[in-house]
Image (cartoon, rainbow, N blue to C red):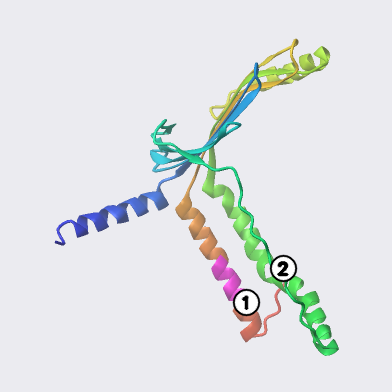
Amino acid sequence: MTDWLYPLLYTLLALGAGVLCLPIALSLHYRRDDLPTTWHLLVQLAFFRGGLGIGFQLAPEGRTLMPVLLGRALPFPVLTLGTEPTTKKKKPKRAKKATPKADKLAAEKKKSAPLDLIRLVLRPALSLLASLPRTFGLKKLRITGRLGFADPAKTGIVNGYLQAVKTLKNKFLSININPDFTRPGAFGQVDLVAHFHLGLLLLFLGRFGLQVVFRFLASRLFGWKLGLI
């Protein structure tokens, strides 16, 4: 009976290691068309370098979920999400009566609590923010379409700037926007693909938590005075 259990366990461990070690592909595709004016937004989150994941499509017609295989959203099976939010009625809470002494202690504690929290978290948070760019990398940004303003002169000026940006050689950035002197508005498509490492992000979050716990114990048990930075 255990002949299939160990291979299944090893497969799950391999998949978990792949999710943590291999980069996760995050892609965003936005398209805005004219005549009639419609828009579509597709967000894909795929593991194993974009091999397998899930996509979320948002459009005026509704919201749908779909599987992603090898970086492309499959047309089936598709799950349509509801748009009507459910609201629950909240019962009013009765206020408790407090003594003047308790109110004074609560006010003093409320004044010191934000500063203590800032001293506890600020330095680890700055270290975490400095490490976050190492977990994220831009792979592709492509912008195609047409751009026009009500003033043709303004359209020409903006088009000059866009042509200057277009001459810059960059393997990650591709801009192809044509001027539209007859119809004001922005129409076209934006494609963004980025990779981020989940395992490295969890490692940095764990380091942040350990630093906060260490500073908390040092201030409470040993009486260390924590600085802001």
Left or right: residue 229 versus residue 199 is: right
Q: Image height check: is 28 above or below 214?
A: above
Q: Residue at (43%, 33%) from the top-left corner?
A: 71
In the figure, is residue 92 to the left or right of 190? Answer: right
Residue at image point 31% right, 52% down: 14
Q: CA distance from mark 2 to mark 1?
A: 12 Å
Q: Residue 169: horizontal and vertical position, in percent?
A: 59, 23
Q: Is residue 22 shown above or below 158?
A: below
Residue 92 counted in the magenta span: no
| Mark carried by residue 216 | 1
Q: Check disc 1 and report its element: helix, strand or loop.
A: helix
Q: Residue type at mark 2?
A: Ile
Q: Is residue 195 above or below residue 160?
A: below
- The residue sitting at 16% across, 62% down in the picture is 2
Q: Which residues are magenta?
A: 209-216
Of mark 2 and mark 1, the one earlier in the sequence is: 2
Provide the secondary structure element on which disc 2 rests: helix
Q: Position of residue 154 (x, y in %)?
A: 81, 17
Residue 147 vs residue 79, the one in the foreground: 79
Residue tagged by mark 2? 118
User: Pointer 2: residues within 10 angstroms few (<14), some, or many (20+)?
Assistant: some
- Name the kind of residue labelled 1 in the image: Phe
State which quadrant residue 60 falls in. Answer: top right
In the image, 128 versus 103, the foreground residue is: 103
Question: Mark 2 near mark 1, Cβ–Cβ under 8 Å?
Answer: no
Nearest the viewer among 4 and 14 is 4
Q: Quadrant of residue 87?
A: bottom right
- Quadrant containing the N terminus is bottom left
How crowded pointer 1 is (Cα within 10 Å; few <14, some 14-19, many 20+) is rated as many
